[in-house]
Image (spheres, rainbow, N blue to C red):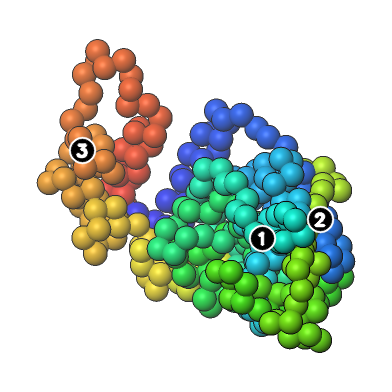
Amino acid sequence: MSKRIFHRLTSSALLITSCLLPSFSYATIVEFQTSQGDFQVNLYDETTPVTVENFLSYTNASNYNNSVIHRSIPGFIVQGGGFEVDTVDNISSLSAVPTQSSIINEPIYSNVRATIAMAKTANNINSATNQWFFNLADNSANLDLQNGGFTVFGEVIGDGMTVIDQIAGLTTCTYSSFSEIPMHEAAEKGCSNLEQPFSDNFVTIYQVVVVDASIDSASSLTPTPTIDTDNDGVANANDAFPTDSTEWLDTDGDGTGNNADTDDDGDGHLDTDDYYPLDASRWEQPSSGSGGSFGFLGLFALALVRLKTILR
């Protein structure tokens, strides 16, 4: 099938589907108020909506209040969102920020300097919950490709990177299970000489607040698209054939792209005879008494297969 036609059809299908779903408006500019200074981030609310909605749900629930930057790797990333400070009897400790359900990955934009992205569990593409990180450098060659790509959902604006770079410049210490946690006075006193409560030395995020609730505040921004080696419009992280511009899907995992494959779902039935060409669990047309469960998506998939046959 022509890749251009395929993408147009896919886009049309997504547009029709989106019309059936409820619409939301998300605040787009938030301010991080920290012990090292304040900075603002413009969120890509319209292009990474699931991720932005997730981030704002934690923000609106005050889950990031009194949390800390628990990981800092100069020249790479500064990470937070996962742990908060508890101080009892003048003794500080870190406890995990409560998490919600993990969200789907949205690897649209590239992990370049000054962007914020969601952290994930290793080898689990759709595992992001509450933790995020700021890219201190262009990490696209690594983070755009690793683990399905890390979702970039906003960028630091104004002179905000001055604050983040200042955080990245702090000496890191080993504290409890954390081996790369930045501490305020570590450079002068040394990690082993820091006194309790450690809350005075953590890089604390006092709160994250919405400062602009406009849904189009990112319209003037030009984020960098994620890596697409073959320039076929599909990010490498989602492309089964990242160096072949004529293929990107391999539904049955047989090593042959869907454009060249005559049995996309590997169920033993040719696509031309398969009413569910992308579903290996069924292939026959439903009876008239099925109640119309086949629906729009099934008809769309069938139309794609018919068109692919014509274009061969």
Disc 1 or disc 2, which is closer to the eye?
1
Hey, what amino acid is under mark 2?
Answer: Tyr
Q: Residue placed at 21% from the left, 60% from the top?
A: 254
Disc 3 or disc 1, which is closer to the eye?
1
Task: Give the mark nearest the N terminus, 1 or 2.
Answer: 1
Residue 288, percent across and down?
A: 24, 15
Horizontal relation, residue 158 to residue 168: left or right: right
Horizontal relation, residue 123 to residue 302: left or right: right
Secondary structure at badge 1 equals strand
Disc 1, disc 2: CB below 8 Å?
Answer: no
Task: Give the mark nearest the N terminus, 3 or 1.
Answer: 1
Look at mark 2 in the image and give the residue it sits on: 206
Closer to us: 268 or 43: 43
Hey, what amino acid is under mark 1?
Answer: Ser
Secondary structure at badge 2 equals strand
Extreme residue toward the front, this view: 89
Image quarter hosting the C terminus: bottom left
Check the image and report above or below for 293 versus 311.
Answer: above
Look at mark 1 in the image and give the residue it sits on: 93
Q: Mark 2: give few (<14), some (14-19) or many (20+) Cα within 10 Å.
A: some
Closer to us: 257 or 82: 82
Look at mark 3 in the image and give the residue it sits on: 281
Q: Mark 1: give few (<14), some (14-19) or many (20+) Cα within 10 Å.
A: some
Residue 99, percent across and down?
A: 57, 46
Give the quarter of the image for residue 295: top left
Residue 152, percent across and down?
A: 62, 61
Horizontal relation, residue 285 to residue 66: left or right: left
The Cα–Cα distance between marks 3 and 1, rounded to whole angstroms, is 51 Å
The Cα–Cα distance between marks 1 and 2, rounded to whole angstroms, is 16 Å
Check the image and report above or below for 71 versus 191.
Answer: above
Residue 150, percent across and down?
A: 54, 63
